[in-house]
């Protein structure tokens, strides 16, 4: 995690009941907590935000990092995209609504707010994350193909999808 301009390594524990991530610094024997939204489990939480990006450290380690920004505030980095995907899926659990999608090998969870995002924006969000994954793994700058198999969606997606303004709309 990026803290005060420096990357620090932590062990993490996820407390889903209180929407908290506990970060344990093994070197200093300290615990830092990150509160994600309302700690009241009975409340709905739709404001978990995850942004993926890739970074290369050319100054110190010459390493390629798979990075994640949580709630526009906390920056995390992992050595590979699989670890970033697992971290993203764990953090997505704090949100009350998730889109679950699969690529060839992995199941992904995306925390989205169905009251403020359209279906088209949701698809664009997934495309961006898939592009970040392929850029990290293969070095590609653009997706070559992206296909939605609407007949396999659960629950089934209405044929009137282009007329729906927000994901929670049913008319």
Image (cartoon, rainbow, N blue to C red):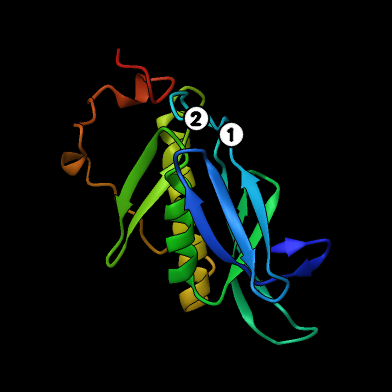
**Res 140 visible:** no
Whether residue 23 sits left or right of residue 16 in the image: it is: right
Instruction: Locate the C terminus by quadrant.
Output: top left
Quadrant of residue 22 in the image?
bottom right
Report which quarter residue 105 is drawn in: bottom left
- Do the numbered discs 1 and 2 sit on residues whose CB atoms are within 8 Å? yes
Q: Residues within 10 Å of mark 1 (few under 14, many from 20)?
A: some
Q: Can you give x and y, in whole percent of width and height, for residue 72 in the image? A: 68, 45
Q: Secondary structure at mark 1?
A: loop
Task: Using residue 134 as the reference point, say whether residue 2 is left or right of it.
Answer: right
Specify few, some or many for label 2: CA neighbours under 10 Å numbering under 14, 14-19, or 20 or more: many
Q: Is residue 137 above or below residue 152?
A: below
Where residue 35 sits, quadrant-wise, is top right
Circle number at residue 45? 2
Q: Secondary structure at mark 2?
A: loop
How many numbered discs? 2
- Given residues 5 and 105, the one toward you in this image is 5
Task: Say whether disc 1 or disc 2 marks the residue closer to the N-terminus.
Answer: 1
Quick one: which residue is furthest to the right in this view?
Answer: 4
Residue shown at the point (64%, 73%) measured from the top left: 26
Q: Nearer the viewer, residue 120 or 102?
A: 102
Q: Which residue is pictured at 73% across the width and 70% down the height?
A: 7
Question: Marks 1 and 2, how far apart in space?
Answer: 7 Å
Q: Is residue 13 left or right of residue 2?
A: left
Q: Which residue is mark 1?
A: 37
Residue 45 horizontal/vertical position (percent):
50, 30
């Amino acid at each position: 995690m990026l803290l005060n301009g420096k990357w620090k390594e932590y062990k993490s524990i996820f407390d889903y009941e209180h929407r908290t991530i506990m970060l344990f610094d093994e070197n200093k024997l300290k615990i830092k907590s990150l509160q994600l939204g309302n700690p009241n489990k009975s409340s709905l939480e739709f404001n978990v935000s995850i942004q993926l990006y890739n970074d290369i450290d050319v100054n110190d380690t010459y390493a390629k990092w798979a990075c994640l920004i949580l709630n526009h505030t906390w920056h995390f980095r992992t050595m590979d995209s699989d670890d970033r995907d697992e971290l993203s899926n764990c953090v997505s659990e704090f949100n009350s609504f998730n889109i679950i999608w699969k690529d060839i090998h992995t199941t992904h969870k995306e925390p989205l707010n169905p009251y403020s995002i359209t279906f088209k924006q949701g698809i664009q969000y997934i495309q961006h994350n898939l592009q970040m994954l392929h850029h990290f793994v293969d070095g590609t700058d653009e997706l070559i193909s992206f296909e939605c198999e609407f007949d396999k969606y659960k629950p089934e997606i209405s044929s009137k999808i282009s007329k729906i303004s927000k994901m929670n709309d049913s008319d």
